[in-house]
Image (cartoon, rainbow, N blue to C red):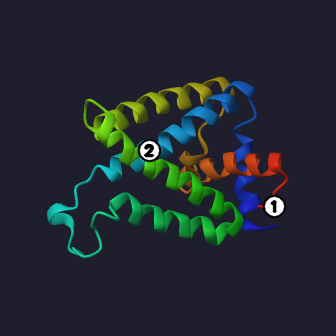
Amino acid sequence: MRKIDGLLEEYGISHQNPTNKAIHWFCVPAIFFSIVGLIYSIPPGPLDSLGFLLSNFTNWATITLIVVLFYYYTLSPPLALGMFLFSAICLALANLLTFYLPFPLWLFCTILFIVAWVFQFYGHKVEGKKPSFLKDVQFLLIGPAWLMHFIYKRLGLIY
């Protein structure tokens, strides 16, 4: 069995209840986006010892996502491609929202993060099982991949 199959199966054990699953379909992408947005909000300023790297084309969120996508690639290259597309959407949305929100992106993402986690914990209360990441922190990254694998299955794609 591939490592990704074992991780997805283990993650799925605590995600059987239809209400909890439905909550995850909204909240996991919201949490992923909110983290991308929060990291996107970090100004390069004095933190940028790689001045040439963090320019108008990149930011801390892009660099973080490169590392995250490498992790996904080690688990499943096809799944990493789907996560790359979702990550690109998150980066584009973060960029867009910086121009159109009447308040800072970090504030919006902080509120979204908190609200989504409240619903996540409610879903696990309904499920009657603790969130997987309490057992192993890597499950924080497996949650989005778990949802992506359902999309792949629906489209008949191999992950």
Q: Quadrant of the N terminus?
A: bottom right
* Residue 158 x/y as whole percent: 81, 61
Q: CA distance from mark 2 to mark 1?
A: 28 Å
Nearer the observer, 155 or 28: 155
Q: State the mark number for residue 93.
A: 2
Tag 1's secondary structure?
Answer: loop
Marked residue nearer the N-terminal end (2 or 1) = 2
* Residue 97 x/y as whole percent: 36, 39
Nearer the observer, 128 or 89: 89
Which corner quadrant of the image does residue 45 belong to? bottom left
Taking the spot 34% from the left edge, 65% from the top edge, the residue there is 57
Taking the spot 48% from the left edge, 27% from the top edge, the residue there is 118
- Residue neighbourhood size for the residue with mark 1, other residues' Cα within 10 Å, grouped as few (<14), some (14–19), many (≥20): few
Q: Is residue 87 visible?
A: yes
Q: Is residue 136 visible?
A: no
Residue type at mark 2? Leu
Q: Is residue 39 above or below residue 3?
A: above
* Residue 159 x/y as whole percent: 76, 61
Nearer the observer, 137 or 94: 94
Taking the spot 67% from the left edge, 29% from the top edge, the residue there is 22
Taking the spot 73% from the left edge, 51% from the top edge, the residue there is 149
Which residue in the protein does label 1 denote?
A: 158
Q: Is residue 13 above or below residue 21?
A: below
Discs 2/1, front? 2
Residue type at mark 1? Ile
- Labels 2 and 1 touching (C-beta < 8 A): no
Q: Is residue 151 left or right of residue 45?
A: right
Q: Residue furthest right?
A: 156
